Image (cartoon, rainbow, N blue to C red):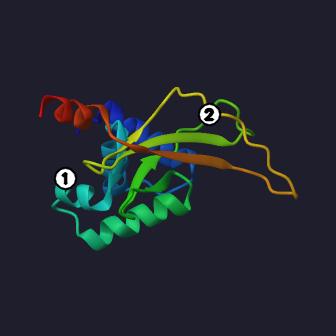
Amino acid sequence: MKKTGDELDAQHILNLFHLKITAPRLRVLSLLAGKDRAVSVLTLTRKMKDINPATLYKIIRTLEAGGVVYKIPDSRGIAHYAIDKLQDQCNAPRLHLHFNCLKCNKVYSLNQQNIPSVSISNGFVAERYVCCLNGTCAKCAKKEVVA
């Protein structure tokens, strides 16, 4: 069986994080890598009907514990997951900016945005910044203008 580019990237990610390579993990990572937004486990179960939902939750928990994916709750409290794209500077905190649409409840990844630096004190060391803006996405805003 020939592997796609996404499968090779997923394999590389699992190797980087020293996680066992399994076909279901590769599929989950490939699906997450192919999206421009964070994905809920419910969406994963719809896309991967041949994998038991309990197994999908276990895969997500393993990937999250391993630092491969991270969780962003939407305005309803439903967890969405995105791949933690490694920064070029290994010692710098990883920055993640998202946009949660309050109309359609999709959580979009906003890449290439400038996130202001945050200074923290008292000996805290940040490893990851996850910021989520709430509002109306372009698609839902366009629907409102037409209506």
The residue to which callout 1 is attached is 47
Instruction: Return the residue nearer the eye: 4 or 69.
Output: 69
User: Extreme left residue here?
Assistant: 147
The residue to which callout 2 is attached is 115
Which residue is painted at 80% across and 50% down in the image? 120
Which residue is painted at 52% across and 40% down in the image? 97
Which residue is painted at 60% across and 28% down in the image? 114
- Horizontal and vertical percent for residue 65? 54, 63
User: Extreme bottom residue here?
Assistant: 54
Could you tell which of marks 2 and 1 lies nearer the N-terminus?
1
- Horizontal and vertical percent for residue 107? 37, 46
72 relative to 142, above or below? below
Instruction: Return the residue nearer the eye: 126 or 62.
Output: 126
- Horizontal and vertical percent for residue 23? 32, 54
Q: Secondary structure at mark 1?
A: helix
- Horizontal and vertical percent for residue 73? 43, 58
Q: Secondary structure at mark 2?
A: loop
Give the quarter of the image for residue 123.
bottom right
Quadrant in the picture for the C terminus: top left
Q: From the viewer's perspective, is 93 left or right of 18?
A: right
Quadrant in the picture for the N terminus: top left
